[in-house]
Image: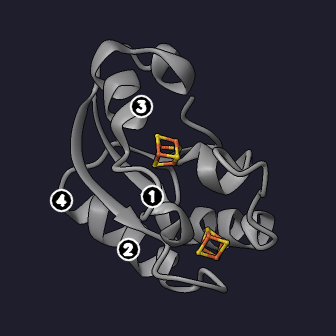
Amino acid sequence: MKVGIIRCQQTEDLCPATTCLACAAHGKGSFAQLGECQVVGVVSCGGCPGKRAVVRAQKLVEKGAEAIALASCISKGVPLNFPCPNHEQMAQAIKAKIGDIELLNYTH
Ligand code: SF4
Ligand code: SF4
C-alpha cells in the first residue's frame, strides 16, 4: 500500500524520519495493519499551529497515498515527550479533507 507521512516540523532538527520510514517499509508499528508500505512522501505539518498539514495531506493523496500517517512526534510527542497541542484539531481537519482515505494516528 502507498502511504504518506506527516511529521512535526519542530522535530526536524532531531530526526530525519528514520524510524517512520523503516516501520512503513517493513509493515511495523501502525503500518502493521497495512503490511509493507511504499512511502510516497514525508512532509512536516508546516509549523504551528498545523493548519498547513491539511493541504499537505491532500497533496500526498494526489501523489498516490492510500493512507496518511500522522507521525508519533505529533501524537505521542517523541522524542521529547512533548505531544502536539494541536494534534486532535489537526487530525479532525485532515479527516474532513481526505474523506475515505485512512488516517493513522501514530507511526512507531
Ligand atoms: S515519529 Fe519518530 S521517526 Fe518519525 S519523524 Fe517523528 S521523531 Fe522521527
Ligand atoms: S503544530 Fe504540532 S506538529 Fe506542527 S510543529 Fe507545532 S507542535 Fe509540531
- Disc nearer the start of the sequence (2/1): 1
Disc 3 beta carbon < 8 A from ligand 1? yes
- Disc nearer the start of the sequence (1/3): 1
Residue drawn at point x = 62 percent, y = 85 percent:
48
User: Is 12 on the left-hand or right-hand side of 18?
Assistant: right
- Could you give the CA–CA distance between mark 4 and mark 2, rounded to whole angstroms? 11 Å
- Could you give the CA–CA distance between mark 1 and mark 3, rounded to whole angstroms? 13 Å
Helix, strand or loop under label 1: strand
Q: Which residue is mark 4?
A: 63
Residue 50 versus residue 44 in the image, above or below: below
Q: Where in the figure is residue 102, as x and y percent of width and height?
A: 52, 43
Between label 4 and label 2, give the one nearer the viewer.
2
Q: Amino acid at mark 1?
A: Ile
- Disc nearer the start of the sequence (4/2): 2
Between label 1 and label 3, give the one nearer the viewer.
3
Residue drawn at point x = 33 percent, y = 42 percent:
66
Numbered tag placed on residue 6 in the rendering? 1
- Could you give the CA–CA distance between mark 4 and mark 1, rounded to whole angstroms? 14 Å
User: Is 22 on the left-hand or right-hand side of 19?
Assistant: left
Q: Which residue is mark 2?
A: 56
Crowdedness near tag 4: few (<14), some (14–19) or many (≥20) residues, C-alpha within 10 Å: some
Between label 4 and label 3, give the one nearer the viewer.
3
Q: Where in the figure is residue 59, as x and y percent of width and height?
A: 29, 71
Q: Are marks 2 and 1 in contact (CB under 8 Å)?
A: yes
Q: Which residue is mark 3?
A: 19
Between label 2 and label 1, give the one nearer the viewer.
1
- Could you give the CA–CA distance between mark 3 and mark 2, rounded to whole angstroms? 21 Å
